[in-house]
Image: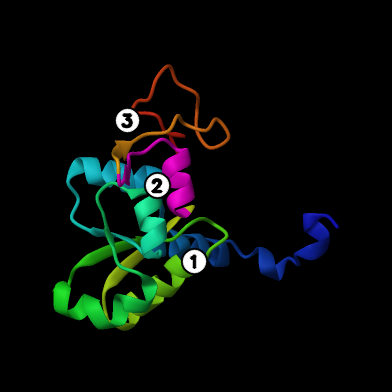
Amino acid sequence: MSITETITETELDTGAAVRHFRGKLAFETDASDVYADQQSGAEFVLVDTRSQAAWDQGHAVGAVHLPTRQVEAEVPGRYPAGTRFVVYCWSPGCNGGDKAALALSLLGYEVRLMIGGFEYWAREGYPVGTALGTVRRDVDELVGPRAAGWSSSVSCDC
């Protein structure tokens, strides 16, 4: 089926599209933007919502470890009102970050989901903390431009 066969003229309302995409961008971010915000000194808490074993295997440098099931009990005592959060889980195929974002929202905090999760953080070549220290993978050319060596300026430029 073509797009014109599945969407009626009423559904093509540009105002609805603007509201949809503005809403998505208000509550989602990506690894490239998170890394750029870290580098610029933006104030937010990056939260890895995965298990201890997943955290130990590798996590975004600068993140704190706070599994989803612990958010409700631990966040109010650790972070003042007004704290901004960005959360992530494993990958686009995991909704643990969404669950943590919901829990933080219910507690009254501003929160955004890092789409792509830890998978895209690592695949895009951003620093990964492990038990052995900080490592960086080469940028996977399926998720970012190839470059001669790793550069913090490598991005899709979107």
What mark, if any, has residue 31 been given in the picture?
2
Residue 126 sits in quarter: top left
| Highlighted magenta segment, given as a residue range | 117-131
Q: Badge 1: few (under 14), some or many (20 or more) residues near its Cα, within 10 Å?
A: few
In percent of width and height, residue 1 lies at 86, 58
Left or right: where 60 falls relative to 139: left
Which residue is identified by label 3? 152
Which residue is identified by label 1? 19
In percent of width and height, residue 154 lies at 39, 29
The one nearer the camera, 5 or 52, is: 52
Helix, strand or loop at label 2? It is helix
**Is residue 23 among what the camera can see?**
yes
Q: Amino acid at mark 3?
A: Ser
Which tag, 1 or 2, sits closer to the chain's start?
1
Left or right: where 112 falls relative to 11: left
Residue 47 is one of the magenta-drawn residues: no
